[in-house]
Image: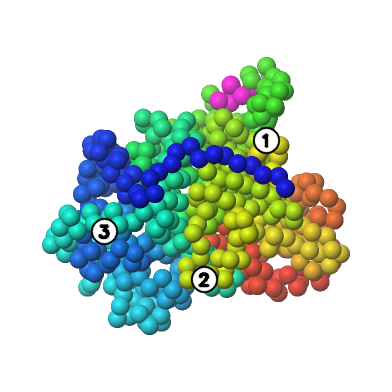
Amino acid sequence: MREAITELLVDLPPAGNITDLLLRTHDADPGRALYALQTGGQWRDLSAEEFLQQVSALAKGLLASGVQPGDAVAVMSRTRYEWTLADVAIWFAGAVTVPIYETSSAHQVAWILEDARPAVVFVEDRQKAEIVLDAAGRAGRADTTTVVRLAPGDPGDGATLMSLTGAGTAVSDAALEAARSSRSLADAASIVYTSGTTGRPKGCVITHGNFALFAVNTLEFLPEFLKQEDARTLMFLPLAHVLARAVQVVCFTGGIKLAHSGSAAQLLEDLTTFRPTFLLAVPRIFEKIHATAGRRAAETGKGRLFAAAERTAVAYSRAVDARGRGGRGPSPVLRAAHALFDRILYPRLRAVFGGEVRYTVSGASPLSEHLTHFFRGAGVLVQEGYGLTESTAPCTVNTVRLTRVGSVGIPMPGMSVRIDDDGEVQVKGAAIFAGYYRNDEATAEAFTSDGYFRTGDLGVLDEDGFLTITGRKKDLLVTAGGKNVAPGPLEEKLRESVLVAQAVVVGEGKPFIGALITLDREALGPWADAHGKPGLTAEQAATDAEVLAELQAAVDAANATVSQAEQIRRFTVLDVEFTVESGHLTPTLKLKRAAVVADYADALDELYSKGKR
């Protein structure tokens, strides 16, 4: 059984907790800008002193409302500064944060309220308040749930952030300190519910130690982009996702300026005006930026130039990899071509990220090797990592000094990764959660006898300790002929096509592998114009011969990466969009395979009953 271990770089006193890290940053430099708030299109810095004052005032308000150390307090909102303020205030009150995705239905919220039993729920606005009140009624907690609105100036009856803060003036500093210091590294800091694609979601108990040890060790492990004086980042992933909140703890621990962007429509403008130096993103963001750049180049008659620049970027990055393994590295001709494109085209791509991004971290789902090389060759280094809700944050990551494209890196400090005999990735260490809330049976099933968490993912470790994820045990397709097929790599390759938004590879119990494909509607219009088909609708495109030929080329490219038995023999184009709202994507834009297969059973039946393409 192969195993890779990275020793803990920094330890912390067991009696401490997350809030000590903020106090340490504040005491070192109270005037240091920790956050940037956007008002009227302008960014205004918020100092550590100002942030601590706001956190303390809100924490006192929670105590005044009856919240006690160890109690649960929920938050349901899109990403915004007030989410962070509420989160840290909950910890200062000694309480436990329960995040709820802003897209959750009343039915989903009801289960969380029933299981975690929060006395207070912060919501973004009146709409979210109505969902929570509905859910509280379903859960039988209507009389014991206080709803507090986060949005400044949001009209309506009930408690607001301002009124709750005002109620805390009677709470003494000594009482607040007693609550704050009552928690230790072993105590729960958050209960984070899994997506629950099958069965009811389970609450993962993330401790103060999980967050705090990740933060102090990550700063030492990734100093190139976290320990720079001007380091700053824009958070646009959902704060209900544990990784986003873990990164926030890293930021206030390291004195890194953080801003928030909670709107997809506003994101590109926020990147341009805030100009982050590093970013946390998911693969779909990189896929969209790549597709948009290619589409804009085609619209301006520079499609061939972009294609040449893309080939050069990928070749250059691959050559850099080869040099790291003792190879020759980029040839003089390749270096010259790369230098040319680095003057005339790559800066435009970097400008999409704000112009000053040096590093990005991609997580939540796999990013294709081609796109990783493309962005790195264009001057945006993508560090791919791997983790789960149960591991708080990445348990492996590629570092600036130790990178292997196609892998998800080496273990984070304090983490051990091994591959079981059946190929399952198992992890153990400082970031692994304490267990499932009020579910001892599920907790026992999740761990091996020697304390390793069973991830359910399949992978391999190379001789240098780099982990590569090859699939998921539950997603592994077994055809009628008994062939095991991992759908993930095929889907990644299909999404490289400019026309493909999502691809779902299917074939469980079937005679061959197939695929359901949805079209990228933003890319379809420009593609249709360029091919003499102006006004082509998504419905028409689903049966258009040229579109199908383009998709077949993408399928052929994917098939070239696998054995004949694993190849996609037929595909169907669905005239739909998979979205978070439709229930087919998670809030971090990961595909919900089971939901797609269930909802499009008729399309699957047709796929396997029609003639071969």
- Identify the residue under disc 1: 464
Which amino acid does the dot numbered 1 rest on? Answer: Asp
| Residue span colored magenta | 337-342
Task: Indicate the quadrant where residue 165 lies.
Answer: bottom left
Image coords of residue 507 (percent x, y):
77, 64
Magenta stretch: dominant secondary structure: helix
Near-viewer residue (545 or 162): 162
Helix, strand or loop at label 3? It is helix
How is the model colour-coded?
rainbow
Residue 464 placement (x, y as % from top left) = 67, 35
The first of marks 1 and 2 along the sequence is 2
Q: Locate residue 112 relative to residue 578 in the image: left or right.
A: left
Mark 1–mark 2 Cα distance, whole angstroms, equals: 37 Å
Which residue, given by chain and number where applicable, does mark 3 sit on? 179
Quadrant for residue 216, please give it: top left
Mark 3: few/some/many CA within 10 Å (<14, 14-19, 20+):
many
The residue sitting at 30% across, 78% down in the picture is 144
Distance CA(mark 2)–CA(mark 3)? 27 Å
The residue tagged 2 is 439
Q: Where 189 falls versus 68 (above or below)?
A: above
Cα–Cα gap, marks 1 and 3: 45 Å
Q: Are marks 1 and 3 in contact (CB under 8 Å)?
A: no
Mark 2 residue crowding within 10 angstroms, few (<14) / some (14–19) / many (20+): few
Say what amino acid the circle numbered 3 marks. Ala
Q: Which of marks 1 and 3 is in front?
A: 3
Q: Residue at x 62, y 47 (%)?
A: 417
From the viewer's side, name the closer residue of 197 and 576.
197
> Is residue 49 visible in the rendered structure shown here?
yes
- Of residues 508 and 447, the one drawn nearer to the viewer in this rendering: 447
